[in-house]
Amino acid sequence: MPYMLTIGIPYELCGTLNPRKIKPFEQCYDNREKLNDTHNWQLGGYVCEAVSVVMANAFSKKGTPKKSYRDKPYYMEKEEHDIATGKKVLSEEEKAIRVQRVFEQLNATLSAKAPVIRNKE
């Protein structure tokens, strides 16, 4: 009975449910625990980042720029990433700039190579 109360089954239903009807309560409890664990892990990330900013500013050499804490929360940065791949979603302008850079690098590589050897006739 304590297990059933722990997973969120009301006291009135504890003796009346069969195992098949208890399964959704168990799944809901597991989902809540996973969400709680993710929340705690994210909170640890915020604390770790805050401590690292403080330590970097406290022990940095004079004249170095001060580090700052993030401007927006993690969830706002997630919106800029594809959920399935975890990669950053690029705007059309960023894609065009990257393609241009690749072609520039390719052109520089091809022009820097050894001269083409021609057949001597």
Image: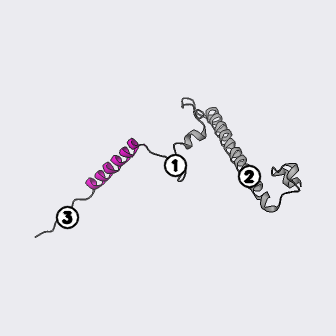
Say what amino acid the circle numbered 3 marks.
Ile
At label 3, counting other C-alpha atoms closer than 10 Å, the crowd grade (few under 14, some 14-19, many 20 or more) is few
Residue 41 picture location, percent across and down? 69, 46
Considering the numbered disc 2 on the image, is that residue within a helix, a strand or a loop? helix
* SS majority, magenta: helix
Comparing 39 with 53, the one in front is 39
Using residue 11 as the reference point, say whether residue 96 is left or right of it.
left
Is there a contact, CB below 8 Å, between mark 2 and mark 3? Answer: no
Q: How many labels does the image show?
A: 3
Q: Which residue is drawn at 87% across and 54% down?
A: 14
Q: Quadrant of the C terminus?
A: bottom left
Residue 29 picture location, percent across and down? 76, 52
Using residue 63 as the reference point, say whether residue 38 is left or right of it.
right
Quarter assignment of residue 59: top right
Picture colour scheme: one colour
Is there a contact, CB below 8 Å, between mark 3 and mark 1? Answer: no
Q: Residue at x 27, y 57 (%)?
A: 113
Say what amino acid the circle numbered 2 marks.
Cys
- In primary-sequence order, the first of circles 2 and 1 is 2
Comparing 11 with 55, the one in front is 11
Say what amino acid the circle numbered 1 marks.
Asp
Q: Which mark is residue 57?
A: none
Quarter assignment of residue 79: top right
- In primary-sequence order, the first of circles 3 and 1 is 1
Residue 20 picture location, percent across and down? 78, 62
Considering the numbered disc 1 on the image, is that residue within a helix, a strand or a loop? loop
Residue occupied by mark 2: 28
Residue occupied by mark 1: 82
Q: Residue 117 carries which label?
A: 3
Residue segment shown in magenta: 91-112
Q: In which quarter of the image is the N terminus?
A: bottom right
